[in-house]
């Protein structure tokens, strides 16, 4: 597959954030070129159209939302099914839990993942435990929480964070992050229809940057199944979301030096696909994990620990992590904070030459 096909079409001047495409055979039917936010909008249209029990709500979703992901939904499906809420994240999630507990599909939007923390108690102590505390007599499995996350080039402290690791520590919920428009549509529909509460983080840097053909029909992609999007023999790279495009660029650079990289998109962080990662590491003998969140306590640490436990005798080098720094997300110093292509390339070479 050529570089142009792999990366889609570049539509901005952010050189380091090239749009990333997917090669999933499940949805190879051709469709219209869509960017990521349009693919999410299409998924929400389908969810509302195919199930009258589906509701979409959050701050400003009635007129399309900050990133326009809900544009046209209220006009088509009415304000009783697509509606604004007060600026109260705890209330949004509390309402969503109740709506889902009554047998509905509640799709709650948190405007930025940075502002999900006021709702932390509702997600961790209510949504995640609803089924368990009743012995499966009742549940709120119809709840899906959408939240834009990650760097955007100018978001600073409060509009750039990657809080996925907080929720990966919570049994009872799933955490899913797409890397491209096609993935976003298929995974979001799977999340909405899954019988468990799901936190669906959307890489906002890719909302308009990532463009690829997306089938117009209703389709779903499996949860908890990682995808090997580039095969290799010397080292395994694991990531998710927008970071995959950066890792792909590093793989291409490493290839020029004769290093064959296998690149895996985890897609679902909890429950994550250990079998696919383990099989790859047993083949390559090396592992590199990269994510935007700070390195300490990031989900990369859990992957590293698990692989060391299961593949210790197969490892040819220590597991490498290329992640954000252990600082609050910066503003003018964002380029220094981010796990860039060159940082990943240096880590690939160091691991292979260990």
Image (cartoon, helix red, strand yellow):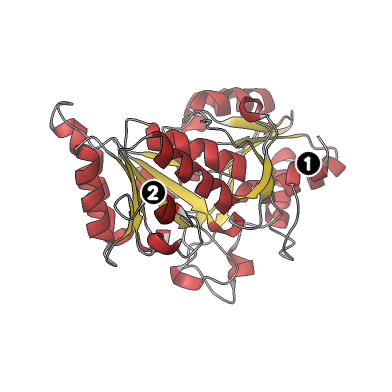
| Percent of width and height locating residue 108 | 34, 51
At horizontal 47% and vertical 30% (from top left) the residue drawn is 224
| Percent of width and height locating residue 104 | 27, 38
User: What number of labels is visible?
Assistant: 2
Q: CA distance from mark 2 to mark 1?
A: 36 Å
Residue 154 is labelled as none
Q: Is residue 56 above or below residue 208?
A: above
**Crowding at label 2, few (<14), some or many (≥20) Cα neighbours within 10 Å?**
some
Q: Nearer the viewer, residue 3 or 285?
A: 3
At horizontal 50% and vertical 51% (from top left) the residue drawn is 202
Please give the residue where the numbered disc 2 appears in the rendered image. Answer: 77
Q: Nearer the viewer, residue 351 or 249?
A: 249
Please give the residue where the numbered disc 1 appears in the rendered image. Answer: 5
Mark yes or no: residue 15 visible.
Answer: yes
Please say if the residues under marks 2 and 1 sit with CB atoms less than 8 Å apart: no
For label 2, the SS is helix
| Percent of width and height locating residue 118 | 27, 61
At horizontal 36% and vertical 35% (from top left) the residue drawn is 51
In the picture, measured across the screen, residue 73 lies left or right of residue 331, that is left
Q: Nearer the viewer, residue 333 or 194?
A: 194
Mark yes or no: residue 20 visible.
Answer: no
Q: Is residue 15 above or below residue 243?
A: below
Quadrant in which the N terminus is drawn:
top right
| Percent of width and height locating residue 75 | 42, 55
For label 1, the SS is helix
In the picture, measured across the screen, residue 4 lies left or right of residue 116, that is right
Q: Which-is-in-front pick, marks 2 and 1?
A: 2
Precedes in sequence: disc 2 or disc 1: 1
């Amino acid at each position: 597959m050529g570089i142009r096909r792999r990366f889609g079409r570049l539509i901005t001047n952010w050189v380091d954030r090239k749009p990333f495409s997917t090669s999933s055979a499940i949805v190879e039917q051709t469709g219209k070129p869509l960017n990521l936010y349009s693919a999410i909008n299409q998924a929400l249209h389908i969810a509302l159209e195919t199930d009258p029990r589906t509701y979409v709500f959050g701050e400003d979703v009635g007129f399309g939302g900050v990133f326009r992901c809900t544009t046209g939904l209220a006009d088509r499906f009415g304000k009783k099914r697509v509606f604004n809420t007060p600026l109260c994240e705890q209330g949004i999630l509390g309402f969503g839990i109740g709506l889902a507990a009554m047998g509905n599909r509640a799709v709650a939007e948190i405007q930025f993942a940075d502002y999900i923390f006021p709702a932390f108690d509702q997600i961790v102590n209510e949504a995640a435990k609803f089924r368990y505390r009743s012995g499966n007599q009742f549940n709120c499995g119809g709840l899906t929480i959408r939240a834009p996350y990650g760097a955007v080039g100018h978001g600073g402290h409060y509009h750039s964070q990657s809080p996925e690791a907080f929720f990966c520590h919570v049994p009872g919920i799933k955490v899913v992050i797409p890397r491209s428009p096609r993935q976003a549509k298929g995974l979001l529909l799977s999340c909405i229809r899954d019988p468990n509460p799901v936190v669906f983080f959307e890489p906002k840097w890719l909302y308009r940057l990532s463009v690829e053909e997306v089938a117009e029909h209703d389709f779903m992609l499996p949860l908890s199944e990682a995808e090997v999007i580039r095969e290799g023999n010397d080292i395994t790279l694991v990531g998710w979301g927008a970071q995959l495009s950066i890792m792909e660029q590093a793989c291409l650079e490493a290839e020029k030096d004769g290093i064959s990289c296998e690149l895996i998109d985890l897609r679902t962080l909890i429950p994550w696909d250990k079998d696919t990662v383990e099989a790859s590491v047993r083949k390559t003998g090396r592992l590199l994990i990269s994510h935007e969140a700070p390195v300490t306590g990031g989900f990369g640490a859990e992957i590293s620990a698990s692989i060391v436990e299961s593949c210790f005798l197969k490892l040819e080098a220590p597991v490498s992590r290329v992640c954000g720094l252990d600082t609050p997300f910066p503003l003018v110093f964002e380029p220094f904070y981010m796990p860039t292509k060159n940082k990943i390339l240096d880590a690939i070479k160091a691991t292979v030459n260990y």
